[in-house]
Amino acid sequence: MRQGGRILARVLKLVAERARPGVGTKELDEFAESEIRKAGGQPAFKGYRGFPSTLCTSINSEVVHAPAIPDRKLKEGDILSLDAGVRYPVKKGMVVDAAITLPVGKVSHKAKRLIKVTKKSLDLAIKKIRPGIYLGDISFTIQNFVEKNNFNVIRELVGHGVGRRVHEEPQIPNYGLKKTGPVLQPGMTLAIEPMVAMGDFSVVLDKDKQTFKTKDGSLSAHFEHTVLVTEKGSEVLTCMPS
């Protein structure tokens, strides 16, 4: 999973560098798939429950799971969430999952702040992770920080365990109470993924039956890392090595 995490971190960084006005989501998707396969991995999302692409390319009010489609191009002022998974090695490999949100060209101050707060909520949650704490402590940390900044966490979509499969137990809501839920144990691998709305937290499923969007049309941001619970704390598996 460490090796797969390095591959995924590198691919997301390279895709983010190519995300600019006028670039198509399908172009980004094809590049991501090529880079994953060249590194000896396999896109974990493509074909999963019928999902058609390597990347989720969610724009503006789209929260998660927007497939990359031909002729859809990024525009100045968009915010783009890139979510991807890698199975490494291809045969009998393990899965890692990560996401980032980035501005496309110049974006509004509010959009920048939404991105910053969502990323910070993930950073704060990761700092909490260690053996013996409750899963609810992570959920509370995310919700508390987001709501203090006058945004809302999405409630119908959650983080999850990850490893042998894309989605495993436990489910990890981005809201909750301290000292509730399962107790973390060394060896757990968790996909922590705050999804945050500028407006109301309610979501709807788009007509494509894949994409979740905010019901009120407000902007949404999404950050995610796969994190290993270690004997003394945690290790982020989906980041570039220092």
Image (cartoon, grey):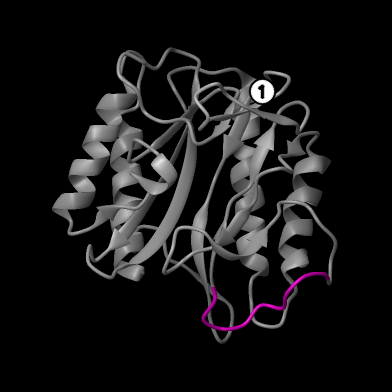
Q: Nearer the viewer, residue 109 or 26?
A: 26
Q: Is residue 182 left or right of residue 93?
A: right
Name the foreground residue: 76 vs 134.
Answer: 134
Q: Is residue 6 above or below residue 202?
A: below
**With respect to residue 241, does 57 lie above or below?**
above
Position of 161 relative to 66 (above/below): below
What residue sits 36% from the left and 15% below the top?
A: 73
Q: Which residue is mark 1?
A: 110
The residue at 43%/18% (across/down) is: 105
Outermost residue toward the left? 38
Q: Residue at x 33, y 41 (%)?
A: 54
**135 with respect to 233 (left or right):** right
Residue 114 drawn above or below residue 71 = below
Q: Quadrant of residue 195?
A: top right
Q: Nearer the viewer, residue 114 or 43?
A: 43
| Residue neighbourhood size for the residue with mark 1, other residues' Cα within 10 Å, grouped as few (<14), some (14–19), many (≥20) | few
The stretch in magenta equals 180-188
Q: Quadrant of residue 5?
A: bottom left
User: For residue 106: magenta?
Assistant: no
Q: Residue furthest bottom?
A: 231
